[in-house]
Image (cartoon, rainbow, N blue to C red):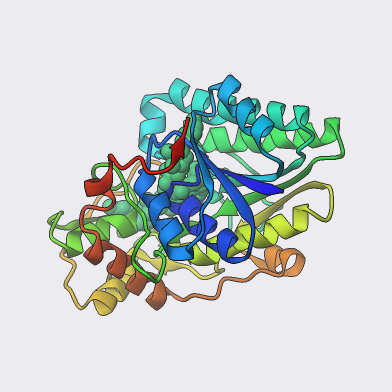
Amino acid sequence: MAILVTGGAGYIGSHTCVELLNAGYEIIVLDNFSNSSPESLNRVKELTNKNFKTYNIDLLDKVNVEKVFLENNIESVIHFAGLKAVGESVEIPVHYYHNNITGTLILIDIMQKYNVFNIVFSSSATVYGAPKQVPISEDFSLSATNPYGRSKLIIEEILNDVYISNNNWSIALLRYFNPIGAHESGRIGENPNGIPNNLMPFITQVSIGKLQELKVFGSDYSTPDGTGVRDYIHVVDLAHGHLKALEKIMTRSGVEAYNLGTGKGYSVLEMVAAFEKASNRKIPYSIGPRRTGDIGECFADPSKAERELGWKAEKGIEEMCIDSWRWQSQNPDGFQKDKNSIAHVLV
Ligand code: NAD
Ligand code: UFG
């Protein structure tokens, strides 16, 4: 029996593949490499000394997705595949809705056909919209402020309906806060296309001189230093959360949402200071206006995941910064130079 990992070549997917393989799971990766490189999977194999099948398939390609279920004995699915850039989603909403929502519909339709009812879905703290208070718990009201967030919200609702229609389904909706960091080996990490939108990859690219300075988006929030506060979580902790969720859905049916965060918020300036300490490099920055759509403060109440999954984030901000720095300094061009490597990819 195998675990199908959609989007397994991506940032969170590749780290989760390492932990799944280390825990002894058989995995199959499905990815169209629209935002990733096959080289990340070569490195997953190198890190774990284990092999697995990889399908270069778009989730929208129903015929080939079905082939994956025909050819393999799949027990559960971890569904990472999706587009995730908030700004881009505002520019090309139809593409985002089609890729994220239609892709998920095709996947769950085929899962039902092959009697595979276990799914862990990558949701996001963005489904809380602009929360009225912090820390945020799972029963807070949900809303979306952009097409990306709305695609996550709609998929959560679809998965709720799917469970109502058939109680065999076992579904974990994992609402990630802000994943940063990288595998401690420095071999896999976040590899954004173009200029990064997110804080940590922006900082790391400033640290190696690829970008000149960080623009801090606003210093007039009602936070201790006026800059935005977020719940940064180490990507390896996040990967472990998927294994715990997988164990849970294999033993019960139902649909449950879990916050995966640390429960502690850090401001932009605190992140700059922590990264400077970890890398021993200065991060030049200037204060700019607020970014449209940003909220001041966002951090999790992660107690449900601890109570029900037995999962808790272990790694602190120092380790997150050290690992981000190691990845960026050892791979200044990400997986770029190996972008055309096609090793062992099926279809
Ligand atoms: P990523 O872009 O690195 O990984 C996503 C992977 O899915 C990529 O390898 C991409 O090529 C693949 N993919 C996209 N559309 C596909 C399709 N139609 N068919 C097949 N493969 C497809 O992103 P990530 O940071 O690893 O995020 C993984 C998931 O977690 C995404 O669903 C994302 O929305 C969600 N998420 C991410 C964050 C974050 O800050 N990184 C926060 C909350 C939620
Ligand atoms: N920030 C800057 N300068 C930058 C980038 C970010 O000051 O160049 C600030 C932001 O204003 C915010 C903080 O750094 O206060 C974090 O911003 P990110 O863009 O890294 O993360 P967000 O919390 O805005 O959003 C991320 C993902 C979303 C996801 C959300 C919750 O981009 O897709 O986390 O998981 F929904």
Coordinates of residue 82 in the picture (x, y in percent): 49, 37
Coordinates of residue 298 in the picture (x, y in percent): 50, 58
Q: Residue at x 32, y 75 (%)?
A: 274
**On the rendered structure, is 138 left or right of 13?**
right
- Looking at this view, is 248 or 273 the one in front? 248
**On the rendered structure, is 134 left or right of 205?**
right
Coordinates of residue 307 in the picture (x, y in percent): 75, 69
Relative to 170, does residue 68 appear above or below in the rendering?
Answer: above
Q: Residue at x 76, y 52 (%)?
A: 249
Which quadrant would residue 230 be assigned to in this image? bottom left
Q: Residue at x 28, y 74 (%)?
A: 273
Relative to 266, does residue 32 appear above or below in the rendering?
Answer: above
Coordinates of residue 279 in the picture (x, y in percent): 24, 75
Looking at this rendering, what residue extends furthest in the right direction?
167
Q: Residue at x 56, y 68 (%)?
A: 263
- Looking at this view, is 328 or 46 the one in front? 46
How many discs mark residues in the rendered view? 0
Relative to 331, does residue 85 appear above or below in the rendering?
Answer: above
Relative to 267, does residue 53 appear above or below in the rendering?
Answer: above
Work out whether residue 222 can be spotted: no
Work out whether residue 302 can be spotted: yes
**On the rendered structure, is 143 left or right of 210?**
right
Which quadrant would residue 329 be assigned to in this image? bottom left
